[in-house]
Image: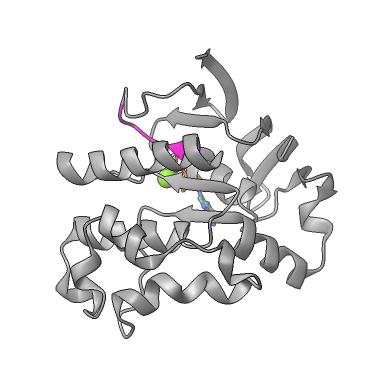
Amino acid sequence: MLLTAKSISKTFSNVHTIIKQANISLEKGKVYVIEGKSGSGKSTLLSMLGGLEPPTYGKIMFKGKSFYDLEEDEQATIRGKSFGFVFQSFNLIPELTVKENIELPIHFITDKNLILNIQDLTKVLEIDKKLNHKPAYLSGGEQQRVAIARALITNPEIIFADEPTGNLDYKTTKIIVDLLSKLNIERQITLVIVTHERGLINIPHTKFEMKDGQLRVVHQYD
Ligand SMILES: Nc1ncnc2c1ncn2[C@@H]1O[C@H](COP(=O)(O)OP(=O)(O)O)[C@@H](O)[C@H]1O
Ligand SMILES: [Mg+2]
């Protein structure tokens, strides 16, 4: 098992429990889809799994080690090397070019042979002509594809995607979903995708639902 969340809970301000004793195990090469209403705690769950926010209770084990008990620099290295994040907000740095934004996470990788080729990656995403532009000159769909390229360039083991195609047009959605599916199949990358869109992912996956703070499996496709 690559990553396991053991009975994780999240409470904000000591009163409001957003997530109650959630369990999830992520295997190499598998796909996990998490659905749930707005405000049900999906982004909070993803942040905890992705090493960005410790749970109030419970543990996250990554390759057998308790992630949040590691030193801060070890946590940062795992986040940088092994995890890729695609957020709803693109979080691009406006002062940097598209190319510089995409290459930001590369400094975590010591063996540069492991990273994906930026030309190939941006060509698939149809942003290869925009590499020297600043993000502000790109459309929303293009900006999201830059954020995707940045998440993928390090060739991570797990990609956490928080509504990666929310508000995007059909064409961009298809490019993104096709690329994620291809990386999953060809490189055995584990995908954890939060989405509203039914039928977005048509490769085998386990589907979860977040409801009333509980995470439960609703379907296992093989
Ligand atoms: N840092 C925080 N402090 C207090 N409440 C928060 C914080 N982050 C999220 N919440 C609350 O937790 C609930 C779940 O939020 P979120 O995980 O963003 O849900 P979703 O992604 O499913 O829409 C919401 O009610 C939100 O207001
Ligand atoms: Mg959210």
Return the x and y of residue 177 as percentages of the image width and height. Answer: 33, 39
In the image, 18 versus 106, the foreground residue is: 106
Return the x and y of residue 58 as percentages of the image width and height. Answer: 78, 41
Q: Is residue 32 above or below residue 80?
A: above
Work out which residue is located at the far bottom of the displayed protein and give it: 95
Return the x and y of residue 52 as percentages of the image width and height. Answer: 61, 58
Return the x and y of residue 45 as percentages of the image width and height. Answer: 57, 42
Q: Is residue 194 magenta?
A: yes
From this viewpoint, is residue 144 visible?
no
Which image quadrant is residue 220 in? top right
Query: Number of marks in the image?
Result: 0
Residue shown at 62% from the left, 62% from the top: 81
Where ligand 2 lies, by image quadrant? top left
Q: Is residue 95 above or below residue 17?
A: below
From this viewpoint, is residue 17 visible?
yes
Q: Is residue 179 above or below residue 93?
A: above
What residue range appears in magenta?
192-197
Q: Is residue 136 magenta?
A: no
In the image, 212 versus 112, the foreground residue is: 112
In the image, 150 versus 6, the foreground residue is: 150
Which image quadrant is residue 70 in? bottom right
Task: Please indicate whether residue 63 sits to the left or right of residue 159 in the image.
Answer: right
Quadrant location of the N terminus? top right
Residue shown at 28% from the left, 53% from the top: 124
Task: Please indicate whether residue 202 sits to the left or right of residue 143 in the image.
Answer: right
User: What's the coloring here?
Assistant: one colour
Residue shown at 39% from the left, 31% from the top: 37
Q: Is residue 62 above or below residue 97?
A: above
